[in-house]
Image: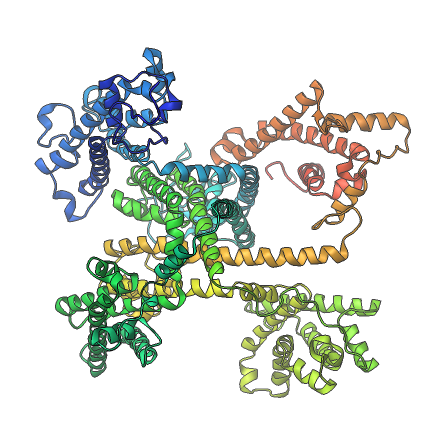
């Protein structure tokens, strides 16, 4: 064996070996003896030689070229794209680049529609693949010989190579006269080849794998919970909307009017829709419908429910009242369904990043103390120009100190002057978009911008001129100085303004001066911190970004093929080319679903995209949120202004007994009457809020007014008692006399809430026909403030306040970054879309614009651009009808939205966790019960108390004990007390498997029965398949339920009580799953329910 210091043949100038998708280290992967020629070829293919590196770059170029031509080829298909450009590439143009038409200049080859680019790429990759098979034994010993080469074929990257080349040969030589999409569609899989060409993916993929492996059990639970919630809500939505005429869809029917009145349509007992009374074709005998209900089956309902769970409500204005109630619950569940996996992934990355930081700190500590001289050098380097003071006797030295040393005379005033100019340019640019271009105000604004430009230019020139005073910035060092972030900002602003004056002197040069807003970065370091986070986690983010791009192109291509022939014109419009499909797919991957009426295959794809979006965005959200908070908190000491866990002060001595009694009574302290009064206040708050909501419904404005009057009187009495008792309230009385304590109380937060809730009532009563009385409906809304009173008992608003105080520095820094991006993107979107007069489908009206609205109406000035851009920066896209340049800008908005959302949401979530955990621990120390842990509820405490206790004996004798024990072991198995292992008899295992199968079959049966075609074919006659299957299922479920009730006396999980089992979640579920069937049977037998119902 060669000495380790001696390089192998042809490896003297090799880069370190890569392991992801390529050959592992030769010392450990294979014992194959290197053959000079083959091994050199292997090293070349693995890019371990200079020539190999060039070849790798060449293959990357070919991959990108191939994918780009595939994407652009859809633009030049007039069959689907009606734009004029679609007919601009035929003949040799098509033959060279795209291969859309079989009659192009290559038709003489007789291999169907193809292109020179595609032929060349396939030939290169074919030769590459053959050579990789030839040298496969250098990757691993298992690939030696003929059998080994066969073993290499199904490896991941081998399949990628085959998938991106073999379809071409199939289409060209086996099926040359067919129009298959396979050859073109599968080109995008060549992007996967790039993953094996980038060695740094190893560590990043390893980190991602560690996170998902560590959290797999929680993610599995989250997945199960999500699927269960999805299925249950889909069933409820099906029941709520299956007969709703507003949910009838006719968009795919060519013979229906655009404004069809669906209230005229009829829905039969099976769920088929007949809209012939409204002017559409009648349904055929085979079940073909021109129109259909979007919730006609649980399968159809599941798509819309999934969109709801992703936070999208495309049919929000079409739901019934029951559907709206379900939608409200779904919106609440949607937060948990999406937040749970994202939170788990984020927490996993937080833990992994913290572990890496600890390992790095441990390594630094093991390396010993840092040399003092090196530390000084590092400090000087970190300080940069601020650590150097030039000779102030020269002009250049004085200028250097003036710009770089804030202690120089008048430097602070000049800095304030510059900041004022920047703020002025920003504000005046906004107002310039609403003034007339020919008016005097526009001229004054342009003059101010030009003056600012002169000042900024002089500042930049003097900074570049004086930088040479610092030896660090002489020669090539000046390039380093000029490439500083803030200096680049200055240069872009100055040259951008110059270009703007030449290109469009009276319309837009002032925009470039807005870039100077980054000047405030020197105070917050927000983008610098963001850059540090990106650099530190570049590997993981690159893998995530590459995966997102791959998924983006993949899903856009799939949806292009599935939706370009969609009978709904609006859907087909947005998928007429792959670039158009990429715009909508980008929004889908960001968690949005602005379009809804997909084909059946399209619905499946969009659902899968939604699941991928959770992972794609969960990774960067976790990394950016955790990394940003870590860096900011390490630089600033972020602590709350006050102790969020402080306990109230003790009662001041010497207080009157009456005010002390009032204080205790109104706070539910000391007596049963006080507790009852406190509970009554809770009840009244809930009641009056419900009444206030009801009174907003037209025709119910005066309902329950008597109850409202009584409630106001009771709240008034409560306020007076609190005012009297304020002298004994530690919050107000500590160090104050009774009078001052009451003054403090009157101006306290909760006192103001109380007054806002009750004073308008008295003003309207004693001042009839006054302005207050005439606007009573607005003042009634103040009653909702009473909800805030509950914060005194169940902390919510105060908890949010504590979180913001705890994380204020991080949130301020993140807010600066968000506001800066908001200002700049709003300006860019105004400039890009202000002249976009294209009229798209279903425009969103803007104020007075009712029809034929275009983007030029919505972005006609900067102030109108602000709300739309702000909404987009939160990740929401109610508008999608943008032009090409607008979509490019919004691509970056989508990326920015990840940071804008992830950082504050991660920081706030972290703050909530810190405060709640701290308070829980403090509460557990004072209220901990014997044998309980922090967070235990009543059930947990009782369960722990039963540890080691045998089940109670039955009152019906030992035979019943034996029967209960047998039932318990059949249902749950027998637990070994020593090891905790569960063992089952064969009978128990078979019964468990059959019962699980029965549950699955019941779910399938319910879904199938909801499909109109299947339900009609089975029929509603007595004894039909579904009825018989349900009866037998209920029979077995009933036996299971009673067995669990019977065995509860021997089950510690039921606390040895049948009643406890009956009221647990699963006990209630078991009962609900069988009780409706018995109720239905009773109603049918008594004649209250006919067979069809």
Which of 320 and 340 lies nearest the eye of the viewer? 340
Q: Residue 588: x, y in percent?
A: 38, 47
Q: Residue 235: x, y in percent?
A: 55, 42
**The quadrant where residue 2 appears:** top left
Which of 569 and 986 lies nearest the eye of the viewer? 986
Which of 981 and 437 lies nearest the eye of the viewer? 981
The C terminus: image quadrant: top right
Q: Residue 261: x, y in percent?
A: 40, 53
> In the rendered image, is residue 851 in sight?
no
How many numbered marks are there? 0
Q: Residue 530: x, y in percent?
A: 39, 56
Q: Is residue 985 above or below residue 750?
A: above
Q: Is residue 179 above or below residue 762?
A: above
**The quadrant where residue 204 appears:** top left
Relative placement, left or right, of 512 versus 1053 is left
Which of 65 and 291 lies nearest the eye of the viewer? 65
The N terminus: image quadrant: top left
> In the rendered image, is residue 401 in sight?
yes
Residue lying at the far top of the rendered structure: 146
Residue at the spot 24% in from the left edge and 21% down from the top edge: 131
Residue at the spot 38% in from the left edge and 23% down from the top edge: 27
Q: Is residue 813 above or below residue 356?
A: below
Q: Is residue 755 above or below residue 304?
A: below
């Amino acid at each position: 064996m060669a000495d380790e210091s001696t390089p192998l043949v042809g490896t003297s100038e090799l880069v370190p070996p890569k392991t992801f998708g390529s050959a592992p280290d030769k010392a450990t992967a294979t014992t194959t003896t290197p053959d000079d020629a083959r091994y050199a070829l292997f090293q070349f293919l693995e890019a371990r030689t200079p020539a190999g590196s060039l070849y790798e770059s060449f293959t990357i170029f070919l991959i990108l070229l191939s994918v780009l031509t595939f994407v652009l080829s859809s633009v030049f298909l007039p069959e689907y794209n009606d734009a004029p450009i679609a007919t601009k590439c035929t003949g040799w143009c098509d033959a060279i680049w795209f291969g859309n038409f079989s009659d192009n200049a290559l038709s003489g080859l007789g291999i169907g529609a193809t292109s020179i680019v595609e032929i060349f790429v396939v030939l290169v990759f074919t030769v590459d693949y053959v050579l990789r098979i030839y040298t496969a034994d250098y990757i691993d010993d298992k690939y030696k010989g003929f059998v080994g080469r066969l073993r290499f074929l199904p490896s991941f990257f081998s399949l990628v190579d085959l998938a991106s080349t073999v379809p071409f040969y199939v289409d060209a030589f086996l099926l040359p006269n067919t129009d298959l999409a396979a050859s073109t569609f599968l080109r995008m899989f060549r992007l996967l080849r790039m993953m094996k060409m980038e060695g740094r993916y190893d560590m990043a993929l390893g980190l991602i794998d560690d996170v998902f492996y560590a959290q797999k059990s929680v993610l599995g639970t989250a997945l199960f919970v999500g699927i269960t919630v999805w299925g249950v809500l889909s069933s409820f939505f099906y029941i709520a909307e299956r007969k709703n005429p507003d949910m009838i869809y006719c968009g795919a029917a060519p013979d229906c009017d655009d404004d069809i009145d669906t209230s005229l349509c009829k829905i039969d007992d099976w769920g088929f829709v007949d809209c012939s009374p409204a002017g559409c074709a009648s349904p055929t005998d085979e079940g073909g419908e021109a129109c259909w209900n979007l919730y006609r089956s649980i399968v159809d309902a599941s798509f819309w429910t999934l969109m709801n769970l992703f936070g999208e409500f495309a049919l929000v204005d079409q739901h019934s009242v029951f559907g709206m109630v379900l939608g409200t619950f779904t919106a609440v569940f949607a937060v948990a369904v999406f937040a749970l996996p994202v939170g788990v992934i984020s927490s996993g990355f937080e833990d992994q990043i913290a572990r890496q930081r600890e390992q790095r700190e441990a390594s630094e500590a093991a390396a010993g103390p840092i040399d003092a001289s090196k530390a000084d050098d590092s400090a000087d380097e970190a300080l940069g120009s601020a650590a150097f003071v030039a000779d102030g006797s020269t002009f250049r030295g004085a200028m250097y100190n003036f710009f770089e040393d804030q202690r120089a005379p008048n430097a602070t005033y000049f800095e304030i002057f510059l900041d004022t100019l920047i703020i002025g340019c920003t504000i005046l640019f906004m107002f310039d978009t609403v003034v007339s271009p020919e008016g005097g105000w526009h001229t004054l604004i342009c003059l101010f911008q030009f003056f600012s430009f002169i000042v900024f230019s002089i500042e930049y020139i003097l900074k570049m001129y004086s930088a040479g005073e610092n030896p660090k910035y002489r020669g090539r060092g000046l390039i380093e100085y000029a490439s500083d972030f803030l200096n680049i900002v200055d240069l872009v602003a100055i040259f951008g303004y110059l270009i703007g004056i030449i290109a469009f002197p009276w319309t837009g040069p002032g925009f470039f001066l807005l870039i100077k807003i980054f000047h405030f970065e020197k105070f917050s370091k927000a983008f610098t911190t963001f850059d540090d986070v990106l650099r530190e986690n570049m590997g993981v983010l690159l893998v995530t970004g590459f995966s997102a791009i791959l998924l983006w192109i993949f899903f856009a291509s799939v949806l292009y093929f599935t939706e370009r022939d969609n009978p709904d014109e609006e859907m087909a419009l947005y998928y007429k080319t792959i670039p158009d499909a990429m715009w909508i797919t980008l929004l889908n991957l960001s968690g949005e679903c602005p379009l809804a009426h997909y084909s059946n295959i399209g619905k499946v794809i969009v659902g899968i995209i939604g699941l991928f979006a959770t992972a794609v965005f969960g990774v960067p959200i976790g990394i950016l949120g955790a990394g940003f908070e870590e860096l900011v908190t390490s630089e600033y000491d972020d602590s709350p202004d006050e102790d969020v866990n402080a306990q109230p002060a003790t009662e001041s001595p010497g207080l009157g007994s009456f005010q002390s009694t009032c204080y205790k009574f109104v706070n539910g302290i000391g007596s049963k009457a006080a507790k009852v009064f406190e509970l009554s206040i809770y009840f009244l708050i809930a009641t009056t809020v419900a009444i206030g909501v009801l009174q907003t419904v037209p025709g119910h404005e005066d309902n329950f007014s008597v109850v409202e009057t009584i409630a106001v009187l009771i709240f008034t009495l409560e306020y007076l008692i609190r005012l009297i008792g304020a002298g004994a309230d530690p919050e107000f009385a500590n160090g104050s006399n009774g009078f001052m304590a009451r003054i403090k109380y009157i101006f306290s937060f909760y006192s103001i809430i109380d007054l806002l809730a009750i004073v308008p009532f008295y003003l309207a009563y004693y001042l009839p026909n006054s302005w207050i009385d005439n606007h009573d409906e607005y003042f009634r809304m103040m009653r909702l403030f009473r909800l805030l009173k509950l914060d005194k008992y169940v902390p919510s608003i105060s908890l949010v306040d504590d979180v913001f105080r705890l994380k204020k520095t991080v949130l301020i820094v993140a807010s600066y970054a968000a506001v800066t991006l908001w200002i700049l993107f709003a300006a860019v979107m105004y400039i890009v879309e202000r002249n976009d007069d294209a009229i798209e489908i279903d425009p969103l009206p803007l104020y007075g614009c009712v029809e034929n609205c275009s983007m030029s109406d919505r972005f006609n000035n900067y102030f109108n651009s602000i709300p739309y851009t702000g909404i987009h920066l939160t990740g929401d896209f109610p508008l999608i009808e943008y032009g090409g340049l607008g979509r490019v800008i919004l691509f970056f908005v989508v990326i920015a939205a990840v940071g804008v959302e992830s950082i504050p949401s991660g920081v706030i979530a972290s703050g909530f966790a810190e405060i709640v955990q701290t308070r829980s621990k403090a509460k557990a120390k004072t209220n901990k019960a014997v044998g309980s842990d922090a967070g235990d509820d009543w059930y947990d405490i009782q369960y722990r108390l039963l540890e080691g206790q045998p089940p109670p004996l039955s009152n019906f004798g030992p035979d019943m004990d034996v029967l209960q024990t047998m039932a318990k072991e059949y249902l749950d198995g027998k637990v070994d007390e020593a090891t905790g292992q569960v063992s089952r008899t064969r009978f128990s295992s078979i019964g468990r498997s059959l019962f699980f199968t029965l549950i699955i079959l019941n779910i399938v049966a319910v879904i199938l029965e909801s499909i109109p075609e299947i339900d009609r074919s089975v029929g509603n006659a007595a004894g039909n398949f579904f009825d018989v299957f349900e009866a037998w299922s209920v029979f077995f479920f009933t036996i299971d339920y009673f067995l669990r009730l019977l065995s509860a006396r021997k089950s510690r999980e039921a606390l040895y009580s049948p009643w406890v089992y009956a009221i647990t979640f699963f006990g209630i579920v078991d009962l609900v799953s069988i009780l409706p069937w018995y109720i239905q049977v009773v109603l049918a037998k008594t004649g209250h329910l006919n067979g069809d119902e």
